Image (cartoon, grey):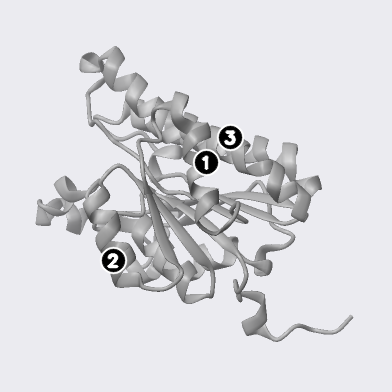
Amino acid sequence: MAIRAPNSLFDLSGKVACVTGASSGLGRRAADILLSAGARVVGVARREAELAAWAAEAGEGADYVAADIADLSEIGAIARAVAERFGSPDILVNAAGINTRESADNVTPGGWQKTLGLNLSAPFFLAQAFAPAMKQKRWGRIVNFASLQSFRAFPGGISYGATKGGVVQLTRAMAEAWSADGINANAIGPGFFRTELTAAVFADPERAARNAAQTCIGRNGEPQDMDGPILFLCSDASAYVTGQTLMVDGGFTAK
């Protein structure tokens, strides 16, 4: 069998991607790297002004749908709106998330349900909505966002950690359900990156330094550290990889 040129393995020309949480942080970074690889990208988030600014800066091939994916009753309408932009997505990156940072004694039903809805329920039901078209094409990529808290317990993270642990198993279950139809499902687990979700961590230089010291590499993550892993899991380069969680954490979970 002929060996493909390495660059062609990562070429997303002709593909359509949907990225949730694209208004900021790692979701926006994922949207940008997929655009750079040739995909047309629809960003989804609640904040329309930030999404519009991203799309304007990104230029041709970028569009957006402002919506609250945590409202599961709207998932069908959101999926249709996304598909109206460039066609039904070949790639779904579920990067949107929330961490209420409530201690176990102070978790409220409202906070629990909000966290569950955005971090775990929405990724599944969006994937379910897009899966039929991916099956027809015999090609699809689903990338869910796991976390250090998928495997480690942190203070104030019981609801967030429960959902992120669920993401790992959800990803395996998606792979079992859909990979025989050409849809690969994997998860990516960021370490400590400077984003809105981790603002409280980086606001404390000593705490940020302690986290960096817990990695094997000796530093916290920079946005560009996500580029290669995201592109790998969204492209033909990962054709025989499914049901896996790739930790992009500098070796934090290895120690």
- Residue sitting at 54 percent across and 69 percent down? 39
Task: Look at the picture and state if 219 lies above or below 19.
Answer: below
Of residues 251 and 85, the one nearer the viewer is 85
Residue mark closest to the camera, 2 vs 1:
1
Point out the residue furthest to the right here.
1
Q: Amino acid at mark 3?
A: Leu
Sequence order check, earlier mark of 3 and 1: 1
Query: Which mark is in front, 3 or 2?
Result: 3
At mark 3, the secondary structure is helix
Residue 213 in view here: no
Q: Of marks 3 and 2, which one's residue comes earlier in the chain?
A: 3
Residue named by callout 3: 170
Q: Give the residue displayed 36% in from the left and 40% down from the top.
A: 67
Disc 2 secondary structure class: loop
| Element marked by disc 1 | helix
Mark 1 — residue?
Answer: 79
User: How many C-alpha atoms fall within 10 Å of the one at disc 3: few (<14), some, or many (≥20)?
Assistant: many
Q: Earlier in the sequence, mark 2 or mark 1?
A: 1
